[in-house]
Image (cartoon, rainbow, N blue to C red):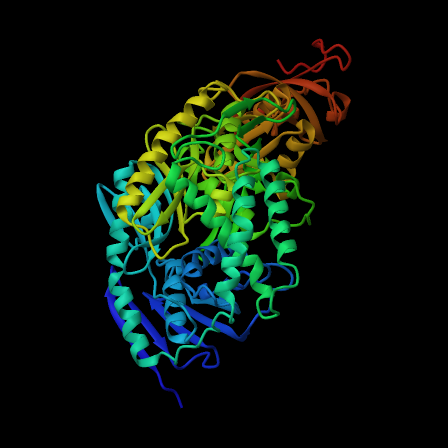
Amino acid sequence: MFNVVRKEMQWGNAKLVLETGKIARQADGAVKVTYGETVVLCTAVGAKQPRPDVDFFPLTVNYQEKAFAAGKIPGGFFKREGRPSEKETLVSRLIDRPIRPLFHPQYRNDTQIVCTVLSHDMENDPDVVSMIGTSAALTISGLPFLGPIGAARVGYKDGEYLLNPSTEAIKESELDLVVAGTRDGVMMVESEASELSEEIMLGAVKFGHEQFQGVLDLIIDLAEEAAKEPREVAELPEGYDALVDKITGLGTEGLTAAYANVVKQERSAAVSAAKADIVEKLGDDVADTLKGKVSSIIKDLEKDIVRGAILKTGKRIDGRTGADVRPILGEVSVLPRSHGSSLFTRGETQALAVVTLGTGQDEQIVDALDGEYRESFMLHYNFPPYSVGEAGRMGSPGRREIGHGKLAWRALHPLMPGKDAFPYTTRIVSEVTESNGSSSMATVCASSLAMMDAGVPLARPVAGIAMGLIKEADDFAVLSDIMGDEDHLGDMDFKVAGTENGITSLQMDIKITSVTPEIMQIALKQARDGRLHILGEMAKALPEARGEVSGNAPTITQFSIPKDKIRDVIGSGGKVIREICEETGAKVDIEDDGSITVAHTDGAKGKQAVDWIKSIVAEPELNHIYDGKVVKAVDFGAFVNFFGARDGLVHISELAPERVKQVSDIVKEGDQVKVKVIGFDDRGKIKLSMKRVDQETGADLEAGEAE
């Protein structure tokens, strides 16, 4: 029934197995990948006919984690997987980025990749496994994919690189880097690092590239036995070359003049006018089979004009040289009621970052395959349409917004103080108010300033810069601080963030088949120079974190109580802690180890809550006098509440027994009294003596004295 082809190899600390021919046989390509006991099914399907009149490749990647893979049942009312999680969205992007440039340039068929996590061993992250499975599925599918690609995760600890460290080992690593590429070079890098040098980061990329060469061999071995016949890609229609020549003649002068405008809005208007002029001059003198190609030919002409000018003259669209960074202005405390805020402007890119400080109750609870955890640092990136002068749909965050937000989060996360030093939950919202290239790196800079403005004790400021590449044959130019047009028309988007000490995040996407180590080394050095320049400009606004948190933020007090006293603070059914919160308005978090965090925007109310809790857990002193309140009068004495929630008994023998037959003759429920601790019974219950007091003045009354 099945024609199963299976290939395996030892890779790092686990066995890697590729298998096809048994599951999902109707897909163009389907491979089940096993690494350790993590299993992912990767499928690739391409439509039989191209989508008409599109000038882009319609590729969709869906990575999905099934709860059963970890032996779990999804939470919520419906008990089934819902919308993609942040992790699923990020991994989908991770898979998409290295494979997209490797499809045939004329391929326009709808293509879908689906990666389904079937088993997770809690040691090997399914993301790299899914990238390898996708590569294998595409390689055997017959689709016009110019792969395969390999991928690997690289860690770094004690001066050594680690191949595919486990999920636990990566927590102790100074580096979490995923690299993907072909035999010849690197296509994609994604990483978070603890202020590592450019040399270490470049070494990690090289190490990963070397280590996945065996995976490429394994995929090729699989394809030699299981690959389908390659599909033919529709050839360019007759007359295409002549149309290219005609459009080049009609449009070169106008587009060259349009791109001479240094202001984005003026340049965009001029480019649109030049394109319209080309279409008008073409008129109806275009064959029906070629009409859908006009837009892509004009785009290629734009590309040639911009790229050629940079390589020939060394001057960019806005007149800068390759290493120049656009003018920068950083501002802080731009919003009066926020806990921290900043406005970072670099050329025509601008980000408004706002910091809000909360308590442990504000932490994000993440239900992941490898277990539930809490996140106390959040960064949310928004890209409204007005930032590029457009009117568009506003909705929930898209893949791009989630990806850019996570990139900025990775850049800042290594510098965040621990919970012991800074007990706040920190949320940053970055609103991109203008965009002309690298809004994610502007978000890094703005967020760093905003946190320092809020008093978050960052170890050092963090800045980011986006690098670009123009490459024709052996000639190339590396560009610092790229604009939107340079990103769209260039060959590389290389984002580097870090401090003056080193790199904290690196992301690279290549639009050509690969990039050499020499180019990466030049880009990293140029990025460091640009990053240090940006840090210098940021320091003009605020050189370091403020000495204390904003007055608008809650005041947080941390202390510990004995674990056996937690029950007393919480009370039966939460009665005591609820009363404390309702009475004082404070937020109180109690951990299992007895750690308590009290937060309040009113310092006095916060102190009241702290004193209340401490009074509950403190032990009353023998022979010490306390204020109390009679909570119950019985035949044998009176129960008095004192010292917070403590109760003690004043025996009737202490209430002048010669003159009193009933306790109610002396005190009644609700009376304010003064009591003295005179001892403890065999069960640890408190014995009290008592003085009555005037209920209005609080003065001592002789009658009813126990002494």
Residue lying farthest to the bottom in this orientation:
1
Q: Residue at x 35, y 28 (%)?
A: 500
Rendered location of residue 462, percent (x, y): 42, 31
From the top left corner, tell me how far across and down residue 154 is, in percent. 30, 50
Please name the residue shown 47% across and 77% down the image.
27
Horizontal and vertical percent for residue 294?
57, 60
Q: Is residue 81 visible?
A: yes
Image quadrant occupied by the N terminus: bottom left
In front: 461, or 122? 461
Q: Is residue 516 left or right of residue 118?
A: left
Asked whether 155 or 140 is in front, the reply is: 140
The x, y position of residue 686, in whole percent, is 55, 28
Horizontal side, residue 199 vs residue 322: left or right: left
Q: Which quarter of the image is occupied by the C terminus?
A: top right
- In this view, 436 is above or below 245: above
Decide: is 223 above or below 670: below
Q: Which is nearer the eye, 707 or 443?
A: 443
Number of numbered discs on residues: 0
Q: For residue 262, which quarter of the picture?
A: top right
Residue 141 lies left or right of residue 449; in this view the side is left
On screen, residue 378 above or below 237 = above
Can the viewer see residue 373?
no
Q: Is residue 642 left or right of residue 214?
A: right
